[in-house]
Image (tube, helix red, strand yellow):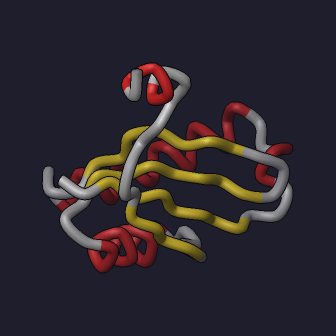
Amino acid sequence: MPRFVIERNIPGAGKLGPDALQRVSQKSCSVLQEMGPQIQWVHSYVTDDKIYCVYLAPSADLIRKHAQAGGFPADQISEVRAVIDPTTGDAAR
C-alpha cells in the first residue's frame, strides 16, 4: 500500500500538552475507524508549528477525506517513493 507523509501547519503544535495530543489522536482514530481498514495512521512527528504524519492509504484523496472529516489541516500530502537510512550506504558494497 502506498505510504504518504502529510504536513499539517498547526501554529504552536509543539506547545500542545499530553491531554491535547491525546484528544487529537482520539479524534483521528475515531475517524479512521469509521473509514475502515484501507487507511492507516502509522505515526506522527510534532514540531514547533507543524505535525508530520505518516499514513498508509491507497490514495491521497482518501487522506484528504480523513483530514476533512476530522477537521485537521492537510497542507501538503506527499507520496513516499523510497525509504533510506544509514544502512542504505552499506548495501552498495
On the rendered structure, is 77 left or right of 50? left
Q: Is residue 62 above or below residue 29?
A: below
Query: What residue is rendered at 30% in x and 79% in y?
Result: 61
Q: Is residue 93 above or below residue 74?
A: above
Task: Name the image quarter holding residue 90.
Answer: top left
Query: What residue is rendered at 55% in x and 24% in y?
Result: 86
On the rendered structure, is 18 left or right of 43? right
Query: What residue is rendered at 40% in x and 21% in y?
Result: 93
The residue lying toward the viewer, choosing from 62 and 19, is 62
Q: Is residue 36 above or below residue 67?
A: above
Task: Name the image quarter holding residue 2.
Answer: bottom left
Q: Is residue 36 above or below residue 90?
A: below
The total of numbered circles placed on residues is 0
Question: At which x and y percent is residue 16?
Answer: 78, 44
**Of all residues shown, which one is farthest toward the front?**
93
The residue lying toward the viewer, choosing from 5 and 62, is 5
The residue lying toward the viewer, choosing from 22 and 64, is 64
Task: Name the image quarter holding residue 3.
Answer: bottom left
Question: At which x and y percent is residue 18?
Answer: 70, 31
The residue lying toward the viewer, choosing from 87 and 32, is 87
Query: What residue is rendered at 62% in x and 65% in y?
Result: 8
On the rendered structure, is 12 left or right of 69? right
Question: At which x and y percent is residue 39?
Answer: 23, 56
